[in-house]
Amino acid sequence: MGALATTASPVAAAEAADIRQYLTFALGSEMFAVGTLSVKEIIEYGHLTEVPMMPGFIRGVINLRGAVVPVIDLAARFGRNPTQITRRTCIVIIEVPTGEERHDIGVVVDAVSEVLEIPAGEIEPAPAFGAKIRTDFIQGMGKVNGKFVILLDVGKVLSVDEISTLASVAGQVPQAMAA
């Protein structure tokens, strides 16, 4: 016959809306995360074409179903040693908004861990000091099982404008050498 319709309480609905999903991954001994809404896919590391005269953090480009996608070594982008490639190393394809456009950028990570749901109440603001990366790259610090996960602001870390500027500087020949 008729089934009773149940509705979630307004408090439960509000709490559910404040929970966000993040893809977590390792870089060295630290855990990082990006919002799952910006992640397009995760692929095996390989088939990179190196591009000459690029900054050290740009590993090259890959052909992703006919599209040229730049691949950035996230550890090197943070000023660390380049990622050592292992069996667990992979490329996370992230969609980065740039004004009206969206660009796909691959990031090399040591290993992808899991997708976590982190309630907004468990996210602290970025620290003013102490992090080993630029503070504007950090969206917040998520508390998970008594540990912090660094939530990255993909719009800042993978800023197409900033990367283009760095790439053009890396490709310039110093005036003394040009003469």
Image: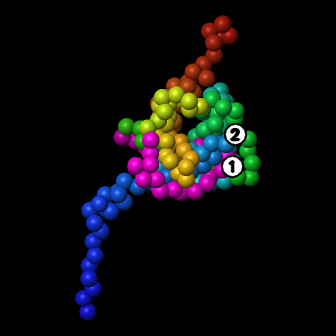
Residue 179 x/y as whole percent:
66, 7
What is the distance, in whole Å, between disc 1 and disc 2 at their CAs? 8 Å
Near-viewer residue (118 or 25): 118
Residue 35 image point, x, y percent? 47, 49
Q: For the residue carrying disc 2, how many other residues have a C-alpha within 10 Å: few (<14), some (14-19), or many (20+)?
A: some
Q: Which residues are magenta?
A: 100-124
User: Please, which residue is most extreme toward the front here?
Assistant: 146
Q: Which residue is mark 2?
A: 83
Q: Judge whether 20 appears above or below 139 on screen.
A: below
Which label sits on residue 47?
none
Q: Position of residue 46 (x, y in %)?
A: 69, 49
**Disc on the earlier residue, 1 or 2:** 2
> For the residue labelled by badge 1, is the local secondary structure a helix, a strand or a loop?
loop
Amino acid at circle 2: Thr
Q: Position of residue 64 (x, y in %)?
A: 58, 51
Residue name at image x 53 percent, y 42 percent: 150
Q: Quadrant of residue 73?
A: top right
> Would residue 27 be visible to someone looking at this image?
yes
Find out whether residue 105 is within the magenta segment. yes
Q: Kindly identify the residue that appears in the image at 37 percent across and 37 percent down.
A: 99
Find out whether residue 83 is within the magenta segment. no
**Residue at the disc numbered 1:** 89
| Relative vertical location of residue 34 with respect to residue 2 in this rendering, above or below | above
Determine the residue positioned at 67% across, 43% down.
29
